[in-house]
Amino acid sequence: MTLPLRLATAGVLVALLAGTAQAAAPWRQVGTDARSGVSGLAAEGAGTALVVHDNKRSGQPRLSRLAYGTDPATVTPLVWEGAEPVDLEAIEAIPGLPGEYLAVAARGIVYRLRVTGTTATVVEYTPLPAIGAGDDFESFALVARDGRFAALWADRGEGAERPATLYAAPLTFAAWGEPRFGAVTRRAFTAPRPADAGTRHISDISVTGAGRILVGSASDAGDDGPFDSAVTDAGQVVLTASGRVRVSLTARPVPLGTFPGHKIEAVECLPGGDALLGTDDENRGGHVRTAPYCGT
Protein backbone atom coordinates (compact mmCIF):
# COMPACT_ATOMS: atom_id res chain seq x y z
CA MET A 1 0.00 0.00 0.00
CA THR A 2 1.42 3.42 -0.92
CA LEU A 3 1.97 6.10 1.72
CA PRO A 4 -0.80 8.46 0.44
CA LEU A 5 -3.26 5.56 0.44
CA ARG A 6 -2.26 4.53 3.97
CA LEU A 7 -2.74 8.13 5.16
CA ALA A 8 -6.11 8.37 3.43
CA THR A 9 -7.22 5.07 4.96
CA ALA A 10 -6.11 6.21 8.41
CA GLY A 11 -8.02 9.46 7.99
CA VAL A 12 -11.20 7.60 7.10
CA LEU A 13 -10.75 5.32 10.13
CA VAL A 14 -10.28 8.30 12.47
CA ALA A 15 -13.41 9.94 11.06
CA LEU A 16 -15.43 6.73 11.47
CA LEU A 17 -14.25 6.25 15.04
CA ALA A 18 -15.03 9.87 15.90
CA GLY A 19 -18.48 9.55 14.39
CA THR A 20 -19.15 6.35 16.33
CA ALA A 21 -18.00 7.95 19.61
CA GLN A 22 -20.20 10.97 19.03
CA ALA A 23 -23.23 8.77 18.34
CA ALA A 24 -22.55 6.66 21.45
CA ALA A 25 -22.46 9.57 23.93
CA PRO A 26 -25.28 12.06 23.35
CA TRP A 27 -25.37 15.56 24.80
CA ARG A 28 -27.19 15.90 28.12
CA GLN A 29 -28.75 19.22 29.08
CA VAL A 30 -27.60 20.69 32.40
CA GLY A 31 -28.98 24.23 32.16
CA THR A 32 -31.84 25.97 30.42
CA ASP A 33 -30.83 29.64 30.11
CA ALA A 34 -27.88 31.99 29.58
CA ARG A 35 -27.02 31.99 33.31
CA SER A 36 -26.52 28.22 33.51
CA GLY A 37 -24.11 27.44 30.68
CA VAL A 38 -20.89 25.50 31.25
CA SER A 39 -17.87 27.82 30.89
CA GLY A 40 -15.31 25.53 32.55
CA LEU A 41 -15.06 22.09 34.20
CA ALA A 42 -12.83 20.49 36.82
CA ALA A 43 -13.15 16.83 37.75
CA GLU A 44 -13.94 16.51 41.46
CA GLY A 45 -14.81 12.91 42.31
CA ALA A 46 -16.37 9.80 40.83
CA GLY A 47 -19.09 11.11 38.53
CA THR A 48 -18.90 14.73 39.75
CA ALA A 49 -17.22 17.89 38.50
CA LEU A 50 -17.18 21.57 39.37
CA VAL A 51 -18.64 23.98 36.81
CA VAL A 52 -17.92 27.70 36.49
CA HIS A 53 -20.48 30.06 34.97
CA ASP A 54 -19.60 33.29 33.13
CA ASN A 55 -22.14 35.38 35.02
CA LYS A 56 -21.35 39.03 35.65
CA ARG A 57 -24.01 40.41 38.00
CA SER A 58 -23.72 40.21 41.77
CA GLY A 59 -25.60 37.27 43.29
CA GLN A 60 -25.72 35.19 40.13
CA PRO A 61 -24.22 31.67 40.35
CA ARG A 62 -20.44 31.49 39.86
CA LEU A 63 -19.76 27.85 40.71
CA SER A 64 -21.84 24.67 40.75
CA ARG A 65 -21.39 20.96 41.33
CA LEU A 66 -22.33 18.75 38.38
CA ALA A 67 -23.30 15.12 38.95
CA TYR A 68 -22.79 13.86 35.41
CA GLY A 69 -22.84 10.20 36.47
CA THR A 70 -26.57 10.34 37.27
CA ASP A 71 -29.53 10.20 34.90
CA PRO A 72 -30.60 12.90 34.52
CA ALA A 73 -27.45 14.90 35.27
CA THR A 74 -27.95 17.37 38.12
CA VAL A 75 -26.40 20.76 38.88
CA THR A 76 -26.25 22.24 42.39
CA PRO A 77 -25.05 25.86 42.87
CA LEU A 78 -22.37 26.33 45.53
CA VAL A 79 -22.04 29.22 47.97
CA TRP A 80 -19.23 31.60 46.97
CA GLU A 81 -17.39 33.22 49.89
CA GLY A 82 -14.93 36.02 49.20
CA ALA A 83 -14.22 38.46 46.38
CA GLU A 84 -16.89 37.92 43.73
CA PRO A 85 -15.44 37.40 40.23
CA VAL A 86 -16.84 38.72 36.97
CA ASP A 87 -17.05 36.33 33.99
CA LEU A 88 -15.40 33.12 35.21
CA GLU A 89 -14.31 31.03 32.21
CA ALA A 90 -12.12 28.17 33.46
CA ILE A 91 -11.38 26.06 36.52
CA GLU A 92 -8.72 23.44 37.29
CA ALA A 93 -8.04 21.19 40.28
CA ILE A 94 -4.60 21.64 41.87
CA PRO A 95 -2.94 18.19 41.69
CA GLY A 96 -2.12 16.71 45.07
CA LEU A 97 -4.25 19.22 47.00
CA PRO A 98 -7.77 17.78 47.42
CA GLY A 99 -10.48 20.43 47.44
CA GLU A 100 -8.16 23.14 46.04
CA TYR A 101 -8.78 24.76 42.65
CA LEU A 102 -7.71 27.65 40.45
CA ALA A 103 -10.44 29.51 38.56
CA VAL A 104 -9.79 32.14 35.89
CA ALA A 105 -11.90 35.11 34.83
CA ALA A 106 -11.96 36.41 31.26
CA ARG A 107 -9.77 39.45 31.99
CA GLY A 108 -7.04 37.34 33.55
CA ILE A 109 -7.69 37.20 37.31
CA VAL A 110 -6.81 33.85 38.93
CA TYR A 111 -8.77 32.81 42.04
CA ARG A 112 -7.45 30.12 44.35
CA LEU A 113 -10.42 28.33 45.89
CA ARG A 114 -10.97 25.86 48.69
CA VAL A 115 -14.17 23.85 48.24
CA THR A 116 -15.71 22.21 51.30
CA GLY A 117 -19.15 20.67 50.98
CA THR A 118 -21.39 23.24 49.31
CA THR A 119 -19.13 26.25 49.92
CA ALA A 120 -16.23 27.63 47.85
CA THR A 121 -13.94 30.03 49.72
CA VAL A 122 -11.52 32.40 47.99
CA VAL A 123 -8.06 31.82 49.50
CA GLU A 124 -6.24 34.38 47.33
CA TYR A 125 -6.39 35.98 43.89
CA THR A 126 -3.89 37.53 41.50
CA PRO A 127 -3.59 38.51 37.81
CA LEU A 128 -2.09 36.25 35.19
CA PRO A 129 1.35 37.40 34.02
CA ALA A 130 2.18 38.87 30.60
CA ILE A 131 -1.39 39.85 29.67
CA GLY A 132 -1.41 41.18 26.11
CA ALA A 133 -3.50 43.95 24.58
CA GLY A 134 -7.04 42.71 23.99
CA ASP A 135 -6.46 39.32 25.62
CA ASP A 136 -9.66 37.46 26.52
CA PHE A 137 -9.13 34.25 28.48
CA GLU A 138 -11.41 31.20 28.41
CA SER A 139 -8.95 28.43 29.29
CA PHE A 140 -6.59 27.16 31.98
CA ALA A 141 -4.81 23.86 32.61
CA LEU A 142 -2.18 22.54 35.03
CA VAL A 143 0.63 20.03 34.61
CA ALA A 144 2.36 18.42 37.60
CA ARG A 145 5.61 16.47 37.99
CA ASP A 146 7.41 15.50 41.20
CA GLY A 147 5.75 18.26 43.20
CA ARG A 148 6.34 20.92 40.54
CA PHE A 149 3.61 22.65 38.56
CA ALA A 150 3.21 24.38 35.22
CA ALA A 151 0.22 26.33 33.95
CA LEU A 152 -1.16 26.75 30.43
CA TRP A 153 -3.72 29.37 29.43
CA ALA A 154 -4.68 31.23 26.26
CA ASP A 155 -6.11 34.36 24.78
CA ARG A 156 -8.95 32.84 22.79
CA GLY A 157 -8.23 34.73 19.56
CA GLU A 158 -10.85 35.75 17.01
CA GLY A 159 -11.14 34.74 13.37
CA ALA A 160 -8.40 34.63 10.77
CA GLU A 161 -6.84 37.92 11.84
CA ARG A 162 -6.22 36.99 15.49
CA PRO A 163 -4.92 33.49 16.27
CA ALA A 164 -5.07 32.34 19.86
CA THR A 165 -1.98 32.95 21.98
CA LEU A 166 -1.12 29.96 24.14
CA TYR A 167 0.84 30.94 27.25
CA ALA A 168 2.81 28.57 29.49
CA ALA A 169 4.80 29.13 32.68
CA PRO A 170 6.07 27.35 35.79
CA LEU A 171 3.77 27.80 38.78
CA THR A 172 4.47 27.94 42.51
CA PHE A 173 2.45 29.05 45.52
CA ALA A 174 3.37 31.53 48.23
CA ALA A 175 3.03 30.40 51.86
CA TRP A 176 -0.30 32.27 52.11
CA GLY A 177 -1.66 30.61 48.95
CA GLU A 178 -1.05 33.16 46.20
CA PRO A 179 -0.26 31.63 42.77
CA ARG A 180 3.11 32.80 41.41
CA PHE A 181 4.14 32.36 37.79
CA GLY A 182 7.64 31.99 36.39
CA ALA A 183 9.02 32.85 32.96
CA VAL A 184 6.27 32.90 30.33
CA THR A 185 6.49 31.40 26.84
CA ARG A 186 4.01 32.09 24.01
CA ARG A 187 2.82 30.15 20.97
CA ALA A 188 0.29 31.18 18.30
CA PHE A 189 -2.46 28.67 17.48
CA THR A 190 -5.08 28.69 14.72
CA ALA A 191 -7.83 26.09 15.01
CA PRO A 192 -8.61 24.00 11.93
CA ARG A 193 -12.32 24.08 12.82
CA PRO A 194 -14.54 26.05 13.04
CA ALA A 195 -13.42 28.53 10.38
CA ASP A 196 -15.94 31.34 10.90
CA ALA A 197 -15.01 35.02 11.13
CA GLY A 198 -15.64 35.01 14.89
CA THR A 199 -13.95 31.70 15.73
CA ARG A 200 -12.46 31.46 19.21
CA HIS A 201 -9.43 29.33 18.45
CA ILE A 202 -8.97 28.19 22.07
CA SER A 203 -12.09 28.10 24.23
CA ASP A 204 -10.56 25.65 26.74
CA ILE A 205 -7.48 23.50 27.34
CA SER A 206 -6.92 20.13 28.95
CA VAL A 207 -3.72 18.09 29.17
CA THR A 208 -3.70 14.28 29.05
CA GLY A 209 -1.57 12.11 31.30
CA ALA A 210 0.90 11.74 28.42
CA GLY A 211 1.18 15.52 28.01
CA ARG A 212 -0.98 15.93 24.91
CA ILE A 213 -2.64 19.35 24.72
CA LEU A 214 -6.33 19.16 23.85
CA VAL A 215 -8.10 22.39 22.94
CA GLY A 216 -11.72 23.27 22.40
CA SER A 217 -12.56 25.82 19.69
CA ALA A 218 -15.90 27.49 19.08
CA SER A 219 -17.81 30.00 17.02
CA ASP A 220 -20.70 32.08 18.33
CA ALA A 221 -23.06 34.10 16.12
CA GLY A 222 -25.06 35.48 19.05
CA ASP A 223 -27.11 34.40 22.06
CA ASP A 224 -29.36 32.24 19.87
CA GLY A 225 -26.59 30.82 17.70
CA PRO A 226 -25.89 29.23 15.39
CA PHE A 227 -22.93 27.66 17.21
CA ASP A 228 -20.16 25.39 16.03
CA SER A 229 -17.18 23.82 17.81
CA ALA A 230 -14.45 21.22 17.71
CA VAL A 231 -11.89 19.49 19.92
CA THR A 232 -8.35 19.21 18.55
CA ASP A 233 -5.10 17.54 19.59
CA ALA A 234 -2.94 20.67 19.43
CA GLY A 235 0.48 19.38 20.49
CA GLN A 236 2.56 18.42 23.50
CA VAL A 237 3.71 19.95 26.80
CA VAL A 238 6.63 18.70 28.89
CA LEU A 239 7.50 19.79 32.43
CA THR A 240 11.15 18.87 32.94
CA ALA A 241 12.72 17.62 36.16
CA SER A 242 14.31 21.05 36.57
CA GLY A 243 10.92 22.80 36.29
CA ARG A 244 11.19 24.11 32.72
CA VAL A 245 8.07 24.09 30.52
CA ARG A 246 8.37 23.04 26.88
CA VAL A 247 5.42 23.40 24.49
CA SER A 248 5.39 21.98 20.96
CA LEU A 249 2.34 22.69 18.79
CA THR A 250 1.34 20.51 15.85
CA ALA A 251 1.99 22.13 12.49
CA ARG A 252 -1.25 20.84 10.93
CA PRO A 253 -3.63 19.88 13.74
CA VAL A 254 -6.64 17.70 12.88
CA PRO A 255 -9.88 17.82 14.90
CA LEU A 256 -10.66 14.79 17.05
CA GLY A 257 -14.34 15.66 16.82
CA THR A 258 -16.62 18.40 15.49
CA PHE A 259 -19.86 19.52 17.14
CA PRO A 260 -22.13 21.73 15.01
CA GLY A 261 -24.94 23.32 17.00
CA HIS A 262 -22.97 23.61 20.24
CA LYS A 263 -20.41 26.03 21.66
CA ILE A 264 -17.81 24.02 23.58
CA GLU A 265 -16.21 26.07 26.36
CA ALA A 266 -15.01 23.23 28.61
CA VAL A 267 -12.73 20.25 27.96
CA GLU A 268 -11.69 18.17 30.97
CA CYS A 269 -9.72 14.92 30.94
CA LEU A 270 -11.20 12.37 33.34
CA PRO A 271 -9.50 9.38 34.97
CA GLY A 272 -9.78 6.46 32.55
CA GLY A 273 -9.24 8.25 29.24
CA ASP A 274 -12.51 10.05 28.53
CA ALA A 275 -12.89 13.79 28.10
CA LEU A 276 -15.86 15.54 29.64
CA LEU A 277 -17.05 18.28 27.27
CA GLY A 278 -19.25 21.18 28.35
CA THR A 279 -21.05 23.85 26.34
CA ASP A 280 -22.32 27.35 26.95
CA ASP A 281 -25.10 27.56 24.38
CA GLU A 282 -26.28 30.91 25.74
CA ASN A 283 -30.11 31.07 25.67
CA ARG A 284 -30.24 27.29 25.16
CA GLY A 285 -28.37 26.66 28.43
CA GLY A 286 -25.55 24.18 28.95
CA HIS A 287 -24.86 20.62 27.81
CA VAL A 288 -22.29 17.94 28.67
CA ARG A 289 -21.13 14.68 27.13
CA THR A 290 -18.08 12.44 27.17
CA ALA A 291 -15.72 11.53 24.32
CA PRO A 292 -12.70 9.16 24.27
CA TYR A 293 -10.03 11.78 23.65
CA CYS A 294 -7.71 11.58 26.66
CA GLY A 295 -6.25 8.10 26.40
CA THR A 296 -2.58 7.57 25.56
Image (cartoon, rainbow, N blue to C red):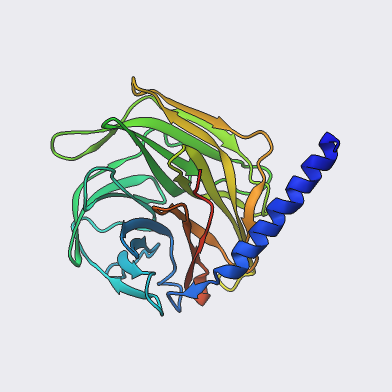
Q: Quadrant of residue 47?
A: bottom left
**At 30% across and 67% down in the image, what residue appears?**
65
Left or right: where 37 falls relative to 2: left
Q: Which of the two residues, 1 or 246, is positioned nearer the viewer here?
A: 1
Q: Is residue 19 visible?
A: yes
Q: State the residue in front, 288 or 145.
A: 145
Is 21 positioned to the left or the right of 132 in the image?
Answer: right
Indicate left or right for 3 with 172 as reference: right
User: Foreground residue, 34 or 251?
Assistant: 251
Residue at 48% over, 42% down: 154
**x then y, percent, for residue 29:** 47, 76
The N terminus: image quadrant: top right
Up the image or down, 232 lies above or below 48; here it is above
Residue placed at 63% from the left, 56% from the top? 257
- The answer to whether residue 134 of the structure is visible from this angle is no
Image coordinates for residue 166, horizontal then vertical, percent? 51, 37
- The answer to which quarter of the image holds residue 35 is bottom left
Q: Where is residue 293 in the image (x, y as percent from the top left)?
A: 53, 52
Q: Quadrant of residue 226?
A: bottom right
